[in-house]
Amino acid sequence: MAFDLVTKKKLKEEFLRLFEQNNGLVYRTCKQIGLTIPLFYKWRSEDPEWNSKINLIQMSLVDQVADKLFEMAMKGNMVAIIFYLVNRSKGEWVNIQRVESHIEMEREKINKTLDTIAKSLRSHNNKEEEKVEELN
């Protein structure tokens, strides 16, 4: 799909306007202006200034969501409070559930390995006892 420079510039401007309206959804915006997704990514890689504008829109949307999350946390939404603390205060707040489940999985692996070793030793001991009996 080849565009002259004027058309390409207008399409890029329109894309930015719609991209913000569509909350940063690439597929929806491309579909609205008749642009293929591969061409969108090609333009991003070829045009650092346009790519920066795309990035600014995406960062703005993340900030908007972060603001809403904070508002919800301030209103007492427990899920928002926990999410905010776990993700914003690194090291102070940890998702204990995830840590505990990881420990439990490791404990299960260790127990299975120990069971396998014990069975192997019993089998080996039985074979040794059989050899001793044969010699007697």
Image (spheres, rainbow, N blue to C red):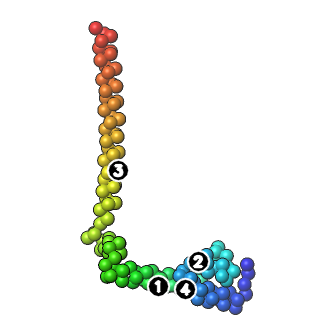
Identify the image quadrant of the N terminus.
bottom right
User: 10 Å neighbourhood of mark 1: few (<14), some, or many (≥20)?
Assistant: some
Q: Is residue 21 above or below residue 123?
A: below
User: 10 Å neighbourhood of mark 3: few (<14), some, or many (≥20)?
Assistant: few
Residue depicted at 49% across the width and 85% down the height? 56
Residue at the disc numbered 4 = 20
Asked if the residues shown at circle 1 and circle 4 are in contact, with their CB atoms under 8 angstroms apart, the answer is: yes
Residue at the disc numbered 2 = 26
Identify the image quadrant of the C terminus.
top left
Circle 3: residue type = Met
Looking at the picture, how far across and down is residue 78, in whole percent? 32, 73
Q: What is the C-alpha distance between the residues marked 2 and 3?
A: 39 Å
Circle 4: residue type = Glu
Secondary structure beneath label 4 = helix
Looking at the picture, how far across and down is residue 40, in whole percent? 63, 78
Circle 2: residue type = Val
Q: What is the C-alpha distance between the residues marked 2 and 1?
A: 15 Å
Instruction: Tell me which label, 1 or 4, sits earlier in the chain.
Output: 4
Q: Quadrant of residue 71?
A: bottom left
Q: What is the C-alpha distance between the residues marked 1 and 4?
A: 9 Å
Circle 1: residue type = Ser
Residue depicted at 32% across the width and 44% down the height? 110
Q: Quadrant of residue 95?
A: bottom left
Asked if the residues shown at circle 4 and circle 3 are in contact, with their CB atoms under 8 angstroms apart, the answer is: no
Q: What is the C-alpha distance between the residues marked 4 and 3?
A: 43 Å
Tag of residue 76: none
Instruction: Tell me which label, 2 or 3, sits earlier in the chain.
Output: 2
Q: What is the C-alpha distance between the residues marked 4 and 2?
A: 10 Å
Residue at the disc numbered 1 = 60
Q: Nearer the viewer, residue 42 or 64?
A: 64
